[in-house]
Amino acid sequence: MALKRTAVALLTLGFAAPVAATAQSPSDDFTRAAFAMADLNGDGLLDEAEVVNDTIVGFVAVDDDADHAIMASDLDPADRAEMAAVDGDGDGRLTIAEVMDMKLEQFRAADTDGDGALTLEEVLAYDRAN
């Protein structure tokens, strides 16, 4: 369940995992690793296409039964409340469309300089603030 829990964290909580508002926390290390994995072209930036790809990969990792939905019953109890915040229609399932809408909204909010790409620093700042 640890892999699934990590994938849910990527899908539903900021761009990485919940982080404490500290200068450097273990969650910062997780964010750095997740950022590096999502940065497919290795340019040190996450563009919208890379965020879309990363969201799809994360969704597929959690959707064990390949029914194109993540059900609350598939998750650890701790993740269910977080899921409810993303479940736009309140039907108890997350679709790729709901997750993608949330991730792209986060992308736009984190892109503080408005250049259409996220630096690691923008992602860390967004995660710490949220």
Image (spheres, helix red, strand yellow):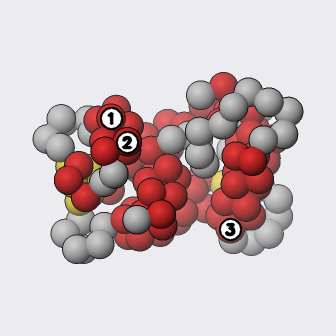
Residue type indicated by callout 1 = Ala
Q: Disc 2 vs disc 1: Cβ atoms closer than 8 Å? A: yes
Image height of 45 relative to 65, above or below? above
Q: Quadrant of residue 123?
A: top right
**Badge 2 density bin: few <14, some 14–19, many ≥20, Cα 10 Å:** few
Residue 93 percent coordinates (x, y): 20, 49
Q: Residues within 10 Å of mark 3 (few under 14, many from 20)?
A: few
Q: Residue at x 24, y 65 (%)?
A: 68
* Mark 3 residue type: Met
Q: Is residue 97 left or right of residue 56?
A: left
Please determine whether, in this image, residue 106 is positioned above or below residue 51: above
For the point 59% across and 46% down, which residue is it? 17
- Ranked by sequence position, the earlier of labels 1 and 3 is 3
For the residue labelled by badge 3, is the local secondary structure a helix, a strand or a loop? helix
The C terminus sits in image quarter: top right
Q: Which mark is residue 31?
A: none
Compared to 74, does 85 lie above or below?
above
First in sequence, mark 2 or 3: give its number: 3
**Where does label 2 land, which residue?**
78
